[in-house]
Amino acid sequence: MRRFISQSLISLIILCSVALSQSSSQKPNNGESARAEAQQLLQQSYEIYKPDTPSAINASLEKAIKAQQLSSQNGYKEGEAFSAAWAGMLQAELGNRTKAIALLTTAVELFDQLGLKREKANQLSRLGYQLTLSGQLETGLDTLRKSAAQYHEIGDRVGEARTLNTLGLVHQDAGNPAQALTFYKQALSLSQAVGDKKEEGLTQLSIGTAYRDQNNTTGALEYFHAALESFKASNDRSWQFHALANIGRVYEATNKLEEACTFYVQALDLVREVDGASKKTELGMLNRIAALYEKAGNATRAK
């Protein structure tokens, strides 16, 4: 699920920056100073944000909340909507689901009032995901379906595919891999139709995990390999690492240790080449490879 959150944050930064700059040029009167201050606060919030860094996330959240309050006090709905959406995602990353749900609900309502259908669909998708994590499974699934329908209505096939993929992830986490596959394959068809190789790869990766959960080794390997090729086509080395690691896990689970080590070593080589790759990830892969060598009776290589 982590990838969903990270992509959401990145997409939201881009959307907010574009939409707010457009709003500023379209509404030069009535509260211009307050709008400019709110925009500046939100821009600062984006700039100081660092994923997986609680201190930076909290600092970013503080500015986003100030931007939302200032926008609300001055009747600046666009600023309030984007600030609420961003603050909601930050609260979600901090694990504050109740606050995240409240903020995302506000954002959905404001975007609906503003007639911004794509932004409303974005927040419905994020809200639905948070609702499922909070234990409100049916409400969350219904919200996600509304998001997919909204994307379909406006012809945003990439957004629709991502939301269908999220529906699959939720069903898989709920222990329904067969139902998950239904949504994943719908998402895959859409990604392939628009030629989005990265989204295609992400969905193939999801399908592979669903087959793995069903102990379908053949299906899992087929889709993990397909994902690897899609990520190569999109030149995304970070996700190539995940595909290689998943292939290795399938072979390890079936006690094909030599094959598992081959793919783990490829994954290790790749993670060392990726800018910003976590040392923790590298160390974890090294430990996994060493454990496999020991299991195979090769203590020398394990060292």
Image (cartoon, rainbow, N blue to C red):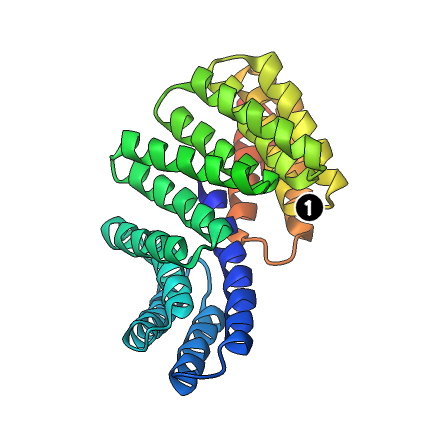
Front position in the image: 115 or 41: 115
Q: Residue at x 47, y 40 (%)?
A: 150
Q: Is residue 279 left or right of 75 when viewed as pictured?
A: right
Using a 10 Å C-alpha cutoff, classify the residue at mark 1 as few (fewer than 14 neighbours), some (14 to 19) or many (20 or more): some
Decide: is 293 above or below 219: below
Q: Is residue 294 visible?
A: no
Front position in the image: 196 or 236: 196
Q: Residue at x 55, y 71 (%)?
A: 22
**Coordinates of residue 96 in the picture (x, y in percent):** 27, 53
Say which element carries label 1: loop
Q: Is residue 220 left or right of 37 when viewed as pictured?
A: right
**Coordinates of residue 84 in the picture (x, y in percent):** 35, 62
Kindly identify the amino acid type of the residue bearing the numbered disc 1: Asp
**Coordinates of residue 122 in the picture (x, y in percent):** 46, 48
Front position in the image: 135 or 264: 135
**Coordinates of residue 39 in the picture (x, y in percent):** 45, 76
Quarter of the image for the N terminus: give it.
Answer: top left
Q: Residue at x 29, y 29 (%)?
A: 138
Residue beneath disc 1: 236
Q: Is residue 25 visible?
A: yes
The total number of labels drawn is 1
Q: Residue at x 31, y 75 (%)?
A: 66
Front position in the image: 243 or 93: 93
Q: Residue furthest bottom?
A: 33
- The answer to which quarter of the image holds residue 294 is top right
Decide: is 24 above or below 271: below
Quarter of the image for the C terminus: give it.
Answer: top right
